Amino acid sequence: MLLRLFLLYTIVHLPLWSGVTMGVRECIDEQLIGIDVSHHQRRINWDTVVQRNNLDFAFVKATEGGDFTDSLFCHNWEELGRVGMPRGAYHFFRSRTDGYAQAMHFLNTVDIQSGDLPPVLDVELTDGVPPHIMLEQMRLWLLTVERALHVKPIIYTNQHFYDKYLAGLFDHYPLWIARYSWEPPVLSTGRRWDFWQFSNEGHVEGIPGHVDLNMFPGNLEQFEKQTLQPDGARPTQANVYAAP
């Protein structure tokens, strides 16, 4: 496993004419690879992304704080729906802003449909507020979105932030961890993660510059259980990666 991940880490730092994930497929088994983007990637040619790269899913930035909407969210969201790539939307959390107001801003912006991934709360900063206030506002966002969509949102953060502020909390929510390394994240609590952002230097045809790369540690059937199901059925959280 470690050898395969070392080869993966090496490959994703090199631009490949045929798309970075072609090399990834040769290195690991039972893993799905996706990207996450925002306006920083500029305007994306999603037809090229789908046709020239072996990708399984994409997350896109939707909102931030109480009133900011990513300038390319609507384009990215609609294009992902058109080309048929599994998609998810994320909200960048600002700890100084009321969690309920942030949740309503997200819900009023994103039309999440059957087959989409659960919404994501991206938490990386305390914004200088005491941790207990940040955690309370997080709870407000998570509960508001969960009650509105009948699905548990995914929490995204980096490994250091998780270990410092979130360890042992929100364990009933899916977890997406950023750790730029060839070694998988091993959290201080030993809990499992559902997605791993393993590089911020990927090269994908159709996207100018670098892009974040992510791994889902399971097969397509397990992945599909993460998505919103028809008729309001809740996703089944596979949570298949066990820390050693």
Image (cartoon, rainbow, N blue to C red):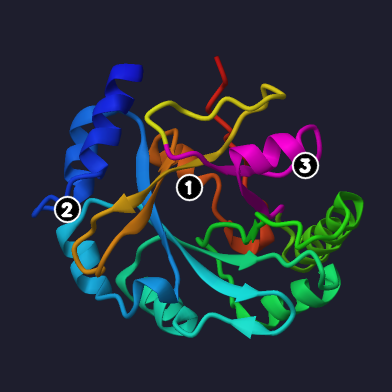
Q: Which residue is label 1 attached to?
A: 224
Q: Quadrant of the C terminus?
A: top right
Cα–Cα gap, marks 2 and 1: 24 Å
Residue 152 in view (yes/no): yes
Segment colored magenta: 152-180
Is residue 216 left or right of 48 when viewed as pictured? right
The residue that appears at 36% across and 63% down in the rendered structure is: 85
- Foreground of the two, 126 or 141: 126
Q: Which residue position is annotated with label 3?
A: 165
**Quarter of the rendering containing residue 182:** top left
Residue 206 is situated, as x and y percent measured from the top left of the image, at 21, 69
Residue located at (72% from left, 65% from top): 149
Mark 2 crowdedness (10 Å alpha carbons): few <14, some 14-19, many ≥20: many
Q: Residue furthest top?
A: 244
Disc 1 element: helix
Residue type at mark 1 is Glu
SS for callout 2:
loop
Q: Where is residue 171 shown, x and y percent of the image?
A: 76, 37
Tell me the kind of residue under disc 3.
Tyr
Q: Is residue 206 above or below residue 52?
A: below
Q: Earlier in the sequence, mark 3 or mark 2?
A: 2
- Alpha carbon of mark 1 to alpha carbon of mark 3: how far? 30 Å
Residue 48, quarter of picture: bottom left
Q: Give the SS element for disc 3.
A: helix
Label 1: few (<14), some or many (≥20) within 10 Å? some
